[in-house]
Amino acid sequence: MIGLAESENQPRRDLVFYFFVLFCIIVIFAYVFWYFVLPFFWSYEKLEISSYCPYYWMANSRGEVKQLVIAFENVGTQDLTIEEMWVDEVLVDSTDWESRSGERTLESESGNTFYMVSKSFMFENGQDYNLTVVTSRKNKFNFTLNVNEDNTNTEKVKISECYFYYWPPLSNNKVVGMQVESLGGTDVIIKKIWIDDASFDVSPRLWLHEFHSSSGIQTSFPWKKGSTYTVTVKTVAGSTYEITATAD
């Protein structure tokens, strides 16, 4: 009798084990499907212009409108990397646009402000321009941007101070430093410095923020004590500003 009872219980234990294994397989499959397979089909890229501070144009000191400042938001479900910008089907050189942070990837539900300049033409008041943004996944987002007096600002910059010193201290490395200020209440990007006829690229470019409009720049230069130099900065919009200072 005992042997018969054990024989009858064996199929039940096998059935329980079978259902347990099947349950584990279903749970694992559901987990993989929900967290790895389904997001692949549901994920998408979507780029929008920020509603908080959408965009504005920047006129340089000569009145030429050549720079756009635009805030983007990634409202998609996956990270988005901007790879190209086109204006009216003209490709903008990759060195002529950049974000405030220097990053070209926007995480999902995040934003960043970009500048873009045109070397080939000026933007005209009253005109519409088509901006096409291409992502690394080759998705395209098109925006129609209008130039008018209400969304065009004129940049105004000054070099408030100029210093001649050694850096690091007690070294023989001569440095020229300058304090640059934006007086126009807008974002300004400094890209180049001249000390007399010697030119230096500012890398990374100095972005003077609308809310933090003063910053310092320094560059190595073999100045001589008692000599006077003309220091000039140039913005990406094409404005130039200078100061004359004596190394003492």
Image (cartoon, rainbow, N blue to C red):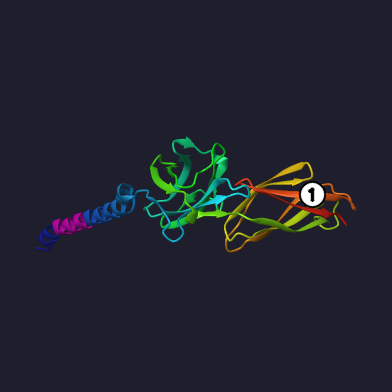
Please give the count of numbered marks on the rendered protein.
1
- Residue 8: x and y in percent read 11, 59
Q: Specify the segment rendered in magenta.
A: 10-20
Query: For residue 17: magenta?
Result: yes
Residue 201 quadrant: top right
Q: Residue at x 69, y 57 (%)?
A: 158
Residue under circle 1?
230
The quadrant in which the C terminus is found is bottom right
Q: Secondary structure at mark 1?
A: strand
- Residue placed most toward the observer, 226 or 3: 226
131 left or right of 62?
left
Circle 1: is it few (<14), some (14-19), or many (20+) Cα within 10 Å? few
157 left or right of 143?
right
Q: Residue at x 73, y 49 (%)?
A: 232
Q: Is residue 244 above or below residue 52?
A: above
- Residue 67: x and y in percent read 55, 47
223 left or right of 86?
right
Which residue type carries mark 1? Thr
- Residue placed most toward the observer, 106 or 114: 114
